[in-house]
DNA sequence: TATTGTTATACTCTATAACTATA
DNA sequence: TATAGTTATAGAGTATAACAATA
């Protein structure tokens, strides 16, 4: 990024004011992980949203679309295209729900299971690389803190 | 969220598989903060991107647009509309750069400084509320870990 | 040749309103 | 009346390619 010659005097903004804000740091850390995951999932034909949906459907056969949307914090209306994409790839099937004729029950195909397994393996390896730079205690602490942040707004 | 009557048997997906992934948890935590910040900044006429840009320009008078874009991890092309918006609101001015006729030097107006101050106060209060749910040690640990994650991809 | 600001464009994610068929 | 899936639509954020002026 700075090849050979050093930076121009006005090229670098030291963002001390922003850096103290947790949201700013969270976003930057997530963006790093996000772009890495995008490159990892792309060869499998998955995006982060379709990947997350596929994993959840595999773990919860018969899941309704609306329940999936709620679990992933995605609007029902935006879920449609995601499931369409998974269905077009032959990874997910929409069946009639056994007890509610309004609803659809989602399940993964054999091919979907295989893709899901590959994706999970790739992501687990990426995760392992991430965790190399922190201790097990630090990870536990981090996950606990993130959980508190995530749920803090629900108490208001 | 579950008023009175308990959930239907198939309504809730327990996403144990996804929950173990850091990226998933980071995203959810950031989304909580993000939506809170959106509501806080909206009355001031700011979005998160325009807010971040305004703070950085206030802290670094004479900043080039390209340097600002680099500091915020935003493409130069996407920076244009952000500065347009800040300029339309009378908060930021684009001046000729003193030593490079290709570049523009950014600075905040009196009104921009005032808005920036208000926004920082609002965000600092939000931050204080966030930090209430964690210890000082946990915060230090969290920031250090996020920094490691953010910079981990640069070493590849 | 490379960089700065810019335009045009496109794709993803997100959010809302409204429709239908069921409950 | 409320809910499930759907369609349409619009606003953000992000990414790339290309251009004119300048280094």
Image (tube, coloured by chain):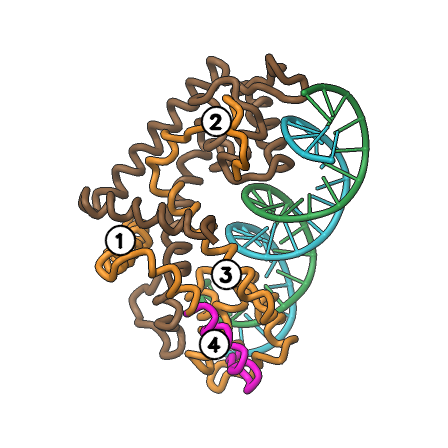
Chain colours: A brown, B orange, C green, D cyan
Across and down, in percent, residue A25 comes to 37, 59
Where in the figure is residue A26, as x and y percent of width and height? Answer: 38, 55
Q: CA distance from mark 1 to mark 3?
A: 23 Å
Residue shown at 52% from the left, 18% from the top:
A62
Q: Nearer the viewer, residue B15 or A49?
A: B15
Answer whether labels 2 and 1 touch (C-beta < 8 Å).
no
Q: Residues within 10 Å of mark 1 (few under 14, many from 20)?
A: some
| Sequence-first disc among 4 and 3 | 3
**Chain at tag 2:** A
Mark 1 belongs to chain: B
Of circles 4 and 1, which is in front? 1
Nearer the observer: mark 2 or 3; the answer is 3
Q: What residue is shown at x 38% (from left), y 51% (from top)?
A: A149
Q: Which residue is mark 4?
A: B57
Q: Earlier in the sequence, mark 4 or mark 1?
A: 4
| Mark drawn on residue A54 | 2
**Residue A32 image point, x, y percent:** 38, 50
């Amino acid at each position: 990024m700075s090849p050979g010659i050093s930076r121009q005097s006005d090229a670098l903004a030291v963002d001390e004011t922003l850096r103290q804000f947790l949201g700013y740091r969270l976003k930057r850390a997530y963006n790093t992980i996000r772009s890495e995951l995008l490159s990892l999932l792309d060869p499998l034909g998955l995006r982060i949203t379709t990947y997350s949906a596929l994993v959840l459907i595999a773990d919860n056969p018969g899941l309704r679309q609306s329940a999936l949307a709620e679990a992933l914090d995605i609007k029902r209306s935006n879920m449609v295209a995601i499931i369409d994409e998974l269905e077009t790839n032959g990874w997910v099937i929409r069946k009639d729900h056994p007890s509610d004729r309004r609803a659809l029950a989602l399940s993964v195909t054999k091919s979907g299971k295989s893709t899901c397994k590959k994706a999970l393996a790739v992501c687990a390896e990426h995760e392992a690389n991430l965790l190399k730079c922190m201790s097990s205690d630090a990870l536990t602490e981090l996950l606990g803190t993130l959980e508190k942040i995530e749920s803090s707004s629900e108490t208001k």
